[in-house]
Image: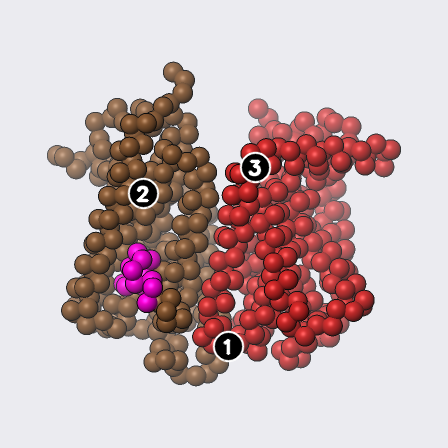
Chain colours: A red, B brown
Amino acid sequence: MKSDTLHMMLVYTKTIMKAWFQYRSNALLSSLTVFLREATGIVVIYFTLLKFGTLGGWNIYEMLFLFSLLFLTYGIMIIFFTGLRDFGKTVRDGGFDRFILRPRGLLFQLIFTNADWFAAVGHGGLGIALFLISAGRVGIQWNAVNILYYLFTVMGGVLIQGAIFLLLAALNIYLLETNSLKELFYWNMRKFAGYPISIFHKAIQVCMIYVVPFAFVNYFPAQYLLRKPDMAQYPQLYLYITPIVGIVMYLAAYGFWKYSLKFYKSSGN
Amino acid sequence: MFLKPYFAFAKKSFLGRSAYRFDHFMSILNTCLQIFIFWGIYQALYGGRSEVDGITMTMVSTSFILSMGLKAVFYVDDYFLPSKVWDGSIANEFLRPVSFRGRMLAENIGNAIFNVIFHFLPALLISVLLIGICPPESAGMTVCFLFSTILGYGVLWTISFAVQAAAFWAINIWSLATLKDVLINIFSGTMIPLWFMPEWIYEALKITPFPYIYFTPVQIYLGQLSYTEIAQQCMLQLIWILLIYLLGTLLFKKGQKKLVVQGG
C-alpha cells in the first residue's frame, strides 16, 4: 500500500460526490425517485398484510426488518461497487485500458473512481427508514452482543453482494456482456429475498442458500434476532456465519478476478 | 392509402424485436418469476383456506397471470419522445409527412403484437402448466375481455404519452416516468389484486385511471361483472383515454411551439 493511497481515496471520493451532487435539486429528486421505486414492493406488502395479518408467521414489522437489511446492505455496497456494476460498459468502450496504464491497482481504481450516489442514498435511505420503523417493534434486545452481531452481519451482507458483482465483472473479461447474467442471478434472485424464504418452493430455497446466497444477507440474520418458528427446518449454524460467507465469497471472487485479468484483451477502438 | 406508413412503422418495430433473442428469453423468464413469486406469497397467505372474501386461490393466480402477462404486452418505451428532444432529432421528425404521434402509437402497437405472440402466450402457457388458471367464463365474456384489454392499453398508452410530452418542459423525465410506474404498480392491481386493498382506497381508486388499465379486464375475464357493468366500465375506460389524451396533446402542442433545438 503506497503512502498516498488514503489521500487519493479521499480526493476521488470528494470529486465524485461533487459531480453527483452538482445539480442539487436534480440529485435530490433522483435519490427520492430511487427511494420510492424501491419502496413499491414494501407498500404492496404493507397493504397485503393489512388484509391478511401475517405472511408465513411474519407480521408487518418483522417483514420490514427483513427488507431493511436487504436495502441497507445494497446501499452501502453500491458506494464501493458501482465501478464493477458498470464494468461491462467500461470494457466495451475501452475505458479499462486507461485504468491499466495508471500506476494504481485496478480494483482500487474501479472501487474509488465511481459511486452511484443516487442509488446509495435511495436504497440506503430506505434501509435506514425501514430499520427505524421496525427495530423497536419486533422485540429485539439491542444489547452489545446484538449490536455487534448486526454490524458484522451488515458487513457480511455487503461482501456477499460485492462478491457477486466482482464475479460478474471478472466474467465480463471473457464474455464482454453479462447484463443478462446479472439480471438472472442477481436481480431475479433478489426479488425473492425480501420475503421469508421458507414460504417458497424447495428449489428456490436451495438457490437462495447455496447458489446466490441472499438468505445470508437478510433471512438468517433476521432469524438470529427474531427467532421465528420457520427456522426449525434449517441448520442452526446458518444463523451465525453471514460474515464468514461474505469473506469467503469475496476472497474467492477476488482470486477469480486476479486470474481472469491475465486473459484481458482490449475491445479495440 | 392513408394508414400505409403506420403499418410500415408497426412492422418495423415488430421485426426489430426479433433481433435480441437471449434478452427476450430472459424477459419471459422474468414475467414467469414475478407470477411465481406472487403465487408463492399468496399460497402462504391463504394457508390452505379455499377462499378469502369469496376470492379463491385460483382467481388470485388468474389475476396475477393475466395482469403480469398484460404488463409485458403493454410495455411502452417512455423515452422515445424525450430522447428525440434531448438530441434534437425531434426537429427532423416534425418535417416528415406523417403524424409523429401516429408513428409513436404504430411502433408501440407493433411491439405489443410481438409481445402478445412471443411473450404473453409463452408465459401464459408456462404459468397454466405450473400453477393453473380459471378457464374463460364464456365466449361472450372473452370477447368483452379482449375489448376491455385494448381499452386498458389505451389508458396506459395515453398516460405514457402525456409523461413523454412533458419532456418539452422538464429535463428529469426519468423521475416522472418512474413515479408513474410506481403509482401504476401499486394501484392498478398488478402487485396486489384490488379486492384485497383497504376498502376506502379501492373506492378512491375508482376515480383515478389506474384500475382501468389491468384490473377491469381481469374482472371481466373472471365473470365478476354483469354486461351492464361491463358497458359502464368500458365507458369509463374510454373517458379516461380521451381526458388523458387531451392533456397529453395540450402538453405536446404547446411544447412543440416553445421547442428550441440547439445547433445546426
User: Of marks 3 and 1, which one's residue comes earlier in the chain?
Assistant: 3
Which residue is drawn at the image coordinates 32% and 24% (left, top)? B91
Which residue is drawn at the image coordinates 39% and 80% (left, top)? B52
In the displayed structure, B103 sits above or below A214; it is above
Q: Chain of mark 1?
A: A
Give the labeled residue for mark 2: B161
Q: Are marks 3 and 1 on the same chain?
A: yes
Which amino acid does the dot numbered 3 rest on?
Arg
Give the labeled residue for mark 3: A24
Q: Secondary structure at mark 1?
A: loop
Q: Residue furthest right?
A: A3
Specify start and end residues of the magenta stretch as a single range: B203-217
Taking the image as shown, residue B46 lies to the left or right of residue A160, namely left
Q: Chain of mark 3?
A: A
Between the C-alphas of marks 3 and 2, the distance is 28 Å
Q: How many numbered marks, from 0 up?
A: 3
Asked where in the image residue A112 lies, by quadrant, the reply is top right
* Location of the N terminus of chain B (image quadrant): top left
Which residue is drawn at the image coordinates 34% and 80% (left, top)? B54
Task: Assess disc 1: are there few (<14), some (14-19) or many (≥20) residues with their C-alpha within 10 Å of its C-alpha.
Answer: some
Between the C-alphas of marks 3 and 1, the distance is 41 Å
Give how far across and how far down residue A178 sits, in percent: 57, 44
Q: Secondary structure at mark 2?
A: helix
Q: Secondary structure at mark 3?
A: helix
Q: Which sits in the foreground, A201 or B58? A: B58
Which amino acid does the dot numbered 1 rest on?
Gly
Which amino acid does the dot numbered 2 rest on?
Phe
Which residue is drawn at the image coordinates 55% and 45% (left, top)? A31
Q: Where residue A53 is drawn, which disc sits there?
A: 1
Q: Which sits in the foreground, B135 or A8? A: A8
Give how far across and how far down residue A201 sits, in percent: 53, 72
